[in-house]
């Protein structure tokens, strides 16, 4: 019996899908591997798991022992998290999902005419797509529910450990999170890249691989 017994852990996993029309859209390379490891580790520690996953994300092997909710775009994900933390007793939120940085603002044809949503954009000529900045969900969660223990992820395209850790600490401060998991973009292409568990107080813990990072994070949460 793990020491997360009686706790409910909300884990977000996979990439968001920002639709251009009803059949096209943009996403990212996140497949939900880390989210699956986190969900299994939380379950093994005795927690109730609410697994929110992207459209193309993997599902944990023990998904039948968890509650699963699928999200689509970043705004949909934010709304589902807000509803969960405000309407349920959520003790821990782990934001492992890879959210979009940009969402669709307006779409024009080649003549500059605004294209209205109509199921599927014509394929005769490429559209002109205007993007706008996506909302940052991590920084809103404590405003929705101040009492949750919040864990964020910070991915950077760098091999500079000090830079990565400084960026993770900055994100942790702005989001008022208790932990950040920092990793480089190389982790998108393999399962044995280094990860750092960065606490709000104390020294970072370096672990190798996604599975070990998930276990190390759960150990930290059990002690928190």
Image (tube, rainbow, N blue to C red):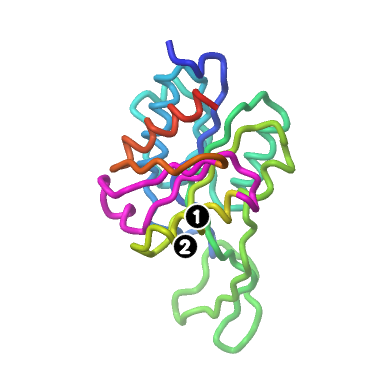
Is residue 163 in view from this perspective?
Answer: yes
Most distant residue in the top direction: 1
Give the camera-side residue of 72 and 47: 47
Q: Quadrant of the C terminus?
A: top right
Give the camera-side residue of 117 and 208: 208
Residue shown at 28% from the left, 49% from the top = 193
Which quadrant would residue 21 be assigned to in this image? bottom right
Q: Which mark is residue 17?
A: 1
Q: Is residue 90 left or right of residue 195?
A: right
* Badge 1 element: loop
Question: Crowding at label 2, few (<14), some or many (≥20) Cα neighbours within 10 Å?
Answer: some
Q: Position of residue 149 (x, y in %)?
A: 61, 33
* Badge 2 element: strand
Q: Are circles 2 and 1 on residues that touch, CB within 8 Å? A: yes
From the viewer's perspective, is residue 84 above or below residue 169? Answer: above
The Cα atoms of the two marked residues, 2 and 1, are separated by 6 Å
Residue ID for mark 2: 26
Q: Position of residue 43 (x, y in %)?
A: 43, 21
């Amino acid at each position: 019996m793990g020491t997360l017994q009686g706790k409910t852990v909300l884990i977000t996993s996979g990439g968001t899908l920002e639709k251009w029309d009803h059949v096209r859209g943009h996403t990212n390379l996140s497949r939900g591997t880390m989210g699956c490891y986190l969900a299994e580790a939380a379950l093994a520690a005795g927690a109730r798991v609410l697994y929110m996953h992207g459209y193309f994300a993997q599902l944990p092997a023990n998904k039948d022992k968890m509650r699963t909710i699928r999200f689509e775009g970043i705004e949909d994900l934010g709304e589902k998290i807000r509803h969960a933390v405000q309407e349920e007793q959520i003790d821990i939120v782990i934001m492992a999902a890879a959210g979009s940085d940009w969402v669709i603002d307006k779409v024009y044809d080649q003549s500059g005419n605004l294209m209205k949503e109509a199921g599927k954009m014509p394929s005769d000529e490429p559209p002109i797509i205007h993007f706008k900045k996506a909302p940052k969900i991590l920084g809103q969660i404590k405003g929705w529910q101040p009492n949750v223990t919040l864990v964020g992820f910070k991915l950077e395209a760098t091999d500079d450990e000090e830079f990565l850790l400084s960026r993770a600490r900055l994100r942790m401060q702005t989001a008022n999170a208790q932990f950040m998991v920092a990793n480089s973009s190389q982790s998108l292409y393999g399962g044995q890249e280094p990860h750092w568990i960065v606490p709000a107080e104390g020294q970072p813990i370096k672990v190798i691989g996604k599975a070990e990072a998930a276990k190390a994070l759960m150990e930290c949460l059990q002690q928190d």
